[in-house]
Image (spheres, rainbow, N blue to C red):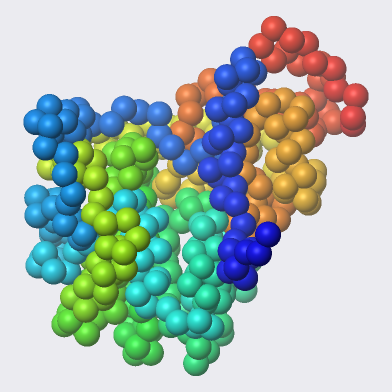
Amino acid sequence: MSLSIIGKSINESVTLKLNEVAALLREKGEPVIHLGGGEPKSRAPLEALTGAAAILNSGEIRYTPVDGIPAMKQAVIRYTEEFYNKRVPPENVIISSGAKQAIMVAMQAILNPQDEVIFPAPYYVSYPEMIKLCGAVPVPVFPEDGSFHPRIQDIERYCTSYTKLIIINSPNNPTGIMYSEEFIAEIVDFCEKRGLYLMMDDIYHRLIFKRTKPINPYDYAKDHTENSKLIIINGVSKVYAMTGFRIGWAVGNRKLISCMSNIQGQQTSGPSVVLQKAAIGAINGIQSCVDSLRITLENNTKVMLEQLNAFKGVKVTPPDGTFYCFADFSSYMKDSKKLAYTLLEKVRVITVPGIEFGLDGYLRLSTCGTIKEITEGIERIKWTIDPNSPNEIYIGQRKLVRDWI
């Protein structure tokens, strides 16, 4: 079979595949613990559900404008004013079927073949593949000091005449690290001076611990005209626990948004009116659900850190937010993919190998589950790879005896 060069170069989404594996194993009655997902277990806000129900009951489920219905745009305008202190007109907003589509359409509007896109590593698993889908070149940047926090000099070292776009995801998936105010100020200034697009992937920006406020890139921008190349990406998936609703958005200059709308119109047309009505309900509704989720995640993270820090040989940098801990297991096994599959096979614990985020020897562990799932999951991991652990463990009704260490 003849496939395109780009098609053959694109890898499967590991995180989505793991979700599929977890579902299949659970259907078979396997005692799976999923520490790999980026999906909160809390329910979607009541206002989201009633918003979707109302439009369903009306029976008026029709095509929507390519760039989003007016009420959804107004909700995003209100959201942007509240959290970014920036008032934007509707022409500067596009609604997409998830933040991932907003990122993809923005890239397609910006990038030419062989253009380069810089992003700090570790990075969201889909960035390199999305960039390759545009025929462009992904350029991950590993901080020279070995930390998870990029420095402007690290970015500058990788910047060439082919560089077109820089992506910043803070707080970061997979590390949970929030980049400093100084760095955000520097990267905004750097991109303005170089004439580069700067995409702020802010999908986790309200899930920050210790009541720390998100950093606003507009505070450091000098160009507030229609020539600005600053793009804000956001959506309802993470902060409102609405992963299956698939509504995201982008805020950018009018010319870019118009181009993105043209592309999106040829790809998928406008997002579902039902899902947009649900998103409107969440954004305009009571926001206590976001605080509740953040507090739950912060408590879960404390428990996971306690478990990991008691695990000799494992190193972890405490996250500032998100759903994740990015833990270094290299003293036990340097091949993170092999380790992840070993844990899945032996003790039915699902994790995401660090190599998918650009750094081998690590595992991304999710704090979305219950305290019981976190503690039992780490206990199973410890039993599998730590020779000092007891030789036997009970998983469900089964007693397992370790015979591979």
Left or right of residue 7: residue 355: right
Q: Nearer the viewer, residue 262 or 236?
A: 262
Image location of residue 18, percent across then percent down: 59, 38
User: Splitting the image into 4 quarters, where does residue 373 fall?
Assistant: top right
Q: Nearer the viewer, residue 179 or 126?
A: 126
Left or right of residue 403: residue 301: left
Q: Please tell me whether residue 189 is drawn above or below residue 53 in the rendered image.
A: below
Image location of residue 21, percent across then percent down: 61, 33
Residue 191 showing in the rendered view:
yes
Q: Please tell me whether residue 185 is drawn above or below residue 114 in the rendered image.
A: above
Image location of residue 204, percent across then percent down: 36, 50
Q: Nearer the viewer, residue 324 or 232?
A: 232
- The quadrant the C terminus occupies is top right
Residue 31 showing in the rendered view:
no
Residue extending farthest to the bottom is 161
Total count of labels: 0
Give me the residue at 37% from left, 40% from top: 243
User: Splitting the image into 4 quarters, where does residue 221 fall?
Assistant: bottom left
Image location of residue 158, percent across then percent down: 56, 82
User: Splitting the image into 4 quarters, where does residue 106 fall?
Assistant: bottom left
Give me the residue at 56% from left, 50% from top: 13
Give me the residue at 58% from left, 30% from top: 22
- The quadrant the N terminus occupies is bottom right
Give me the residue at 31% from left, 27% from top: 43
Q: Nearer the viewer, residue 265 or 173?
A: 265
Q: Please tell me whether residue 118 is drawn above or below residue 232 in the rendered image.
A: below
Residue extending farthest to the top is 397
